[in-house]
Image (spheres, rainbow, N blue to C red):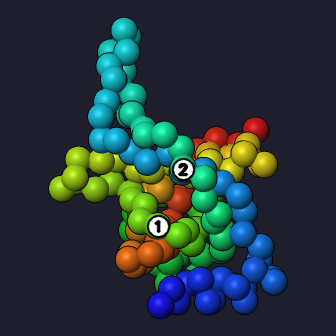
Amino acid sequence: MNLRGIANSVTQAVNPNIPAQIKPSSGGWVTNPDGTREPQFGDPVDVAVQRQALTQKDLMHIDGMNLSGVVALFYINGNWYSVNRPDGKGGDIILIPSKSEEWLVVAVTELWPDWTRVLACLQLST
């Protein structure tokens, strides 16, 4: 049973899903000529995300993470990750083309077989 799918069918009336793409981290890096390193990502995957504000408990959690900037929660079908050291992967990137936004997944707050709740930090907005 996809519990998120059931809940999402109700919450969309108040907070509609947003068409997005996720660039999954491949775990690889490329070293540029100037010595800086860039993470590598797999092909973008089309998804629908539901962005929500942080709860008081989430705010307490990120207080110890030393994050600054704009952060939000995203509910997404499938499994997506922040830093995953055992698999050697960095954070996945959520792209929201309609708003020209790029969000870095910095924490996975819930991971279920068919959906994920992630905390993401805004990286780019034009």
Residue 74: quarter of image: bottom right
Whole-Å distance between the Cαs marked 2 and 1?
11 Å
- List x then y, in percent, for residue 16: 77, 73
The label shown at residue 78 is 1
**Front position in the image: 85 or 61:** 85
Q: Kindly identify the residue that appears in the image at 44 percent across and 75 percent down.
A: 114
Q: Is residue 7 left or right of residue 1?
A: right
Relative height, residue 56 to residue 48 (above, below): below
**N-term-proximal mark, 2 vs 1:** 2
Tell me whether circle 2 and circle 1 mark residues in contact (CB < 8 Å).
yes
Would you call the spot at circle 2 few (<14 residues within 10 Å), some (14-19), or many (20 or more)? few
Looking at this view, name the residue that lies furthest to the front: 1
- List x then y, in percent, for residue 50: 66, 70
Secondary structure type for disc 2: strand
Residue 76: quarter of image: bottom right
The label shown at residue 40 is none
Residue indicated by mark 2:
45
Q: Kindly identify the residue that appears in the image at 55 percent across and 84 percent down.
A: 4
Relative height, residue 1 to residue 16 (above, below): below
Instruction: Let me know if residue 68 appears in the view.
Output: no
Relative height, residue 76 to residue 57 (above, below): above
Looking at this view, name the residue that lies furthest to the left: 86
Instruction: Let me know if residue 112 appears in the view.
Output: yes
Q: Kindly identify the residue that appears in the image at 33 percent across and 23 percent down.
A: 30
Q: Is residue 29 left or right of residue 85?
A: right
* Amino acid of disc 2: Val
Number of numbered discs overlaid on the protein picture:
2
Would you call the spot at circle 1 few (<14 residues within 10 Å), some (14-19), or many (20 or more)? few
Secondary structure type for disc 1: loop
* Amino acid of disc 1: Gly
